[in-house]
Amino acid sequence: MSPSTLTSPIRVYIVEDYHLVRTGLISMLSEFESIQFVGEAESAEDALSQLDELQVDILILDLGLPGMNGIEMAHIVRQRWPSIKIVIVSSHNQSEEVIAALGAGAQAYAMKDIKPYRLAQVIEMVHEGAFWLDPSIASQVLSLAQTPVEAQTSVYQDFHLTERERDVLQLIVKGMNNQEISEALFISIHTTKAHVGSILGKLCVSDRVQAAIKAISEKIV
């Protein structure tokens, strides 16, 4: 996906307490025509006082904020402004924090060493409804979910997932969108969408983020 294919800019707001990091991200991402920054704050409290007055599509959020942390803010944003999608950009890579951030409503979790072009792509993907995890984080989270084959078999029997659906779910947890899953498994995009829909139904969840969280917490992958 090219970060210049959108017909109108994605309105982005950033919450980051380090001035140098915040201004650096704004400067680098402003190079992409698909992104328009509409505001910034160095604390969750300051940001929350401004969001009612702004039209925000994507919130770039750090976890280690002074006062209210990023996870607490994500919970509030999800309740008050459910249309705003959240991209975590943090130096924190502990699996527990990643899961907590996803549970709070984040659609993406990136490390601060992510390349600007890739972050612009992530912002576009999240804006279009995708879920994304930094590959290094996905590997750590998946490592927590490793169980003996016998245990995995019993869980999959409970949810009635097919082997192909299991493959698709593993890639969802890794943060791949439908096109990437289609290419990785050599199946059509139509078939991929059908598998994703079936997985959501069998897991009794409404979106990919919830499916990923359930897959990790229930040790399905």
Image (cartoon, helix red, strand yellow):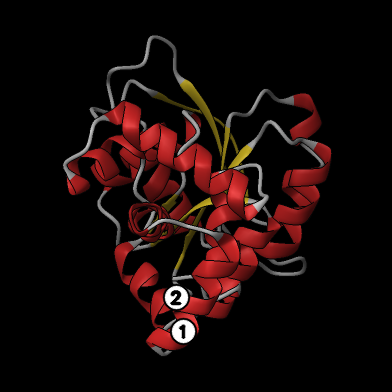
Q: Is residue 128 above or below residue 91?
A: above
Observer able to see residue 61: no
Residue drawn 33% across the image and 33% down it: 191
Do labels 2 and 1 touch, CB within 8 Å?
yes
Residue 38: image x %, image y %? 57, 28
The image's mark for residue 25 is: none
Callout 2 environment at 10 Å: few (<14), some (14 to 19), or many (20+)? Answer: many
* Place of residue 30 in the rendered image (x, y in percent of width and height, measured from the top left): 36, 31
Q: Residue at x 71, y 25 (%)?
A: 54
How far apart are the two marked residues, 2 and 1, measured between alpha carbons?
5 Å
- Local secondary structure at mark 1: helix
Crowding around mark 1 (Cα neighbors within 10 Å: few <14, some 14 to 19, many 20+) is: some
When asked about the image quadrant of residue 120, the answer is: top left
Residue 141: mark in rendering: 2
Q: Which quadrant holds residue 142?
A: bottom left
Residue drawn at (49%, 85%) of the image:
151
Secondary structure of residue under mark 2: helix
Q: Amino acid at mark 1?
A: Leu
Percent across and percent down for residue 124 are 40, 32
Q: Position of residue 153 (x, y in %)?
A: 45, 77
Residue 22 in the figure: left or right of residue 137 = right
In the rendered image, the quadrant that contains the C terminus is: bottom left
- Which residue is labeled 1 in the image? 144
Is 10 on the left-hand or right-hand side of 188? Answer: right
Q: Is residue 40 above or below residue 143?
A: above
Q: Nearer the viewer, residue 24 or 84?
A: 84
Q: What residue is rendered at 60% in x and 73% in y?
A: 217
